[in-house]
Amino acid sequence: YARVQSDLLAQGLLRRDGGGADTPFSERQLTENFIRIALFEEFANVGGRMVARQSESRLHRWEQPVRIQAHFGRSVDSAQRAEDRSVLSTYASRLARVTGHPITTVSSGGNFHVLYLSRDDQTTAGDLVRRLVPGVGPETIAEIEALPRSTFCSVYAFSQSGGRSVYVAAVAIIRDEHPSLLRRSCVHEEVAQGLGLPNDSPVARPSIFNDDEEFALLTRHDELLLRMLYDPRLQPGLEPAEARPTVRRIAEQLLGGPS
């Protein structure tokens, strides 16, 4: 993973500047990026297995306050734990400011759990996940424990029972083997995705919701996506066609277009 980070940096990737003059985007692009990232799913459940397949979804987000709690595998030393908690706390404050939604870090009683695990810890993480999210399905446990090394990090968000598109719990997996920037990049992407931006788009730029690794950390564009997601004019459960007119109006207002 250290070699991966070094190679990406050598290519000018993993940017930390949030985007600039070289990455303009319009109201139309912001609208389309929001629709693709917030209202499509990256994976589909096929026969109990999650397979890569783009499909329309509904708008999901949290209604209750988000309480982010860090959990550490045996390989994570005390200095690294302190750094990880600091990164999470700073990021939670930023996300709360951007979304207008209550988002904090806690030492207990969390509902958004960030697990920093080595490969060995990951393969036996099932009991911990079951304690954190009672009722989690065996398919999810199996996927977490078998997450391949090529998957740098992942997040699983769980909706309210009864079919409502409201998140009530989430679990993010961050590899302890990652060097500092990849580790922070994973936190930025997975926590933001667990708030309700589950998909990636190859045309979203500047964005961490793009598999090209150009940006390591949340960008100005991504902050606008989160602000749109938690705008009270949108409601959980909306489908893409229902949401599009309102999304377009919000995007225009955020970028100074028609009111």
Image (cartoon, helix red, strand yellow):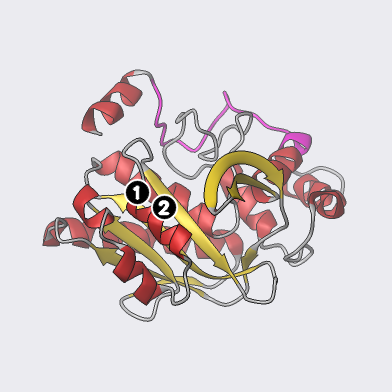
Q: Which residue is mark 2?
A: 143
Mark 2 and mark 1: span between their CA atoms? 5 Å
Q: Viewed as shown, does residue 199 lie left or right of 26?
A: left
Is 222 included in the stretch rendered in magenta? no
Classify residue 228 by image quadrant: bottom right
Residue 129's x, y, as percent? 36, 68
Q: Residue at x 39, y 31 (%)?
A: 14
**As drawn, 14 above or below 243:** above
The magenta segment: 12-29
Say whether marks 2 and 1 touch (CB < 8 Å): yes
Secondary structure of the residue carrying tag 1 is: loop
Q: Is residue 190 above or below residue 86?
A: above
Which residue appears farthest toward the top when viewing the image? 11
Residue type, mark 2 in image: Glu
Q: In the picture, residue 207 is in which quadrant? A: top right
* Mark sitting on residue 146: 1
Q: Position of residue 154 (x, y in %)?
A: 43, 49
Q: Which mark is residue 258?
A: none
